[in-house]
Image (tube, helix red, strand yellow):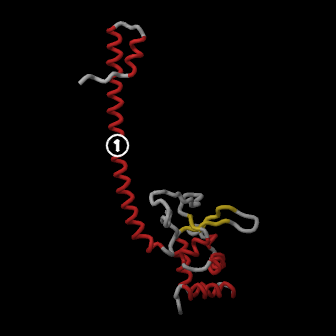
Amino acid sequence: MAEPKRLTQAGIAKLGLSPEVEQALTKIQAELGDAYRDAFVQMVGALREQAAAIQRIQATLSILVDNLVPQMRGQAPSAFTIVADGEEPDLARALVVADPIAAGFTLTQQDLADALGLPASTVSPLVRAFGFQEKEDCAVLVRAGKRNDIVNYHSKAVQTFRMMLNDLTTRKKLNKADQSAFDRARRKLGMND
C-alpha cells in the first residue's frame, strides 16, 4: 500500500530545495506528525482514566449523601446540597460559607437555631442572655453594625447552648422574658423537669 501523500509535501516541493533537504524536511514532518498522534493517544487514555476516576468518586459521594443526609438534619449545615429533581446530578454548586477567620465560625444565628431544632425567636433572646458574644469559643464578631452586630457561631455553640438549657441554675439568672424563652426551649427539646 502506498503511503498517503501529506498536504505539506506540495508546499515543500514549491520551495525549490535540493532533494536531500526536501527529504529531510519530509522526514522531520513525519516524525512530528507521529509524535503529535502518540501524544493525542496518550491524552485520550488519560482522559478516559480521569473519567473512570470521576465516576468512582461520584458513586462514592452518592453513597455518602444517601447515608449521611438523614443523620445531618437538625445539625450544623453541610457544605454541599442535594440535587433536586430535574437538575443535573453531576453539576457542582459551591456554597459560600462565611468564616472570616477560618476557625470554624460558620453558623449564623438562624443556622444555630436550625441546628438546635428551635425557632429563631426562642434562640435569639437566649443567645444574648447566655452571653454567647462574650464566649470566644462560641462566637466571633464578624462586623459591628449601627443597630445589630453580625456574629458567627462555632459548632461548639450548639453543645454549649444545650448544656446551659440542661442547667436549671442558669434559668434563675435570667430576667422574666428570658426565663419564658428558656422554658419554651426546654419544652420544645423535651427537657421536662
Side of 190 relative to 3 (left or right): right
Q: Is residue 162 above or below residue 6?
A: below
Q: Which residue is mark 1?
A: 46
Side of 89 relative to 42 (left or right): right
Side of 1 relative to 80 (left or right): left
Q: Is residue 60 above or below residue 47?
A: below
The residue closer to the viewer here, 175 or 49, is 49
Label 1: which secondary element: helix
Q: Where does the image place residue 32, in percent across and percent down from the top left?
A: 35, 25
Q: Where does the image place residue 66, in percent across and percent down from the top left?
A: 40, 69
| Location of residue 62 by image quarter | bottom left
| Location of residue 171 by image quarter | bottom right
Tag 1: residue type? Ala
Q: Where does the image place residue 54, in percent across and percent down from the top left?
A: 38, 53
Q: Is residue 131 above or below residue 22?
A: below
Q: Where does the image place residue 42, in percent across and percent down from the top left?
A: 33, 38
Furthest residue to the left? 1
Q: Residue at x 64, y 64 (%)?
A: 141
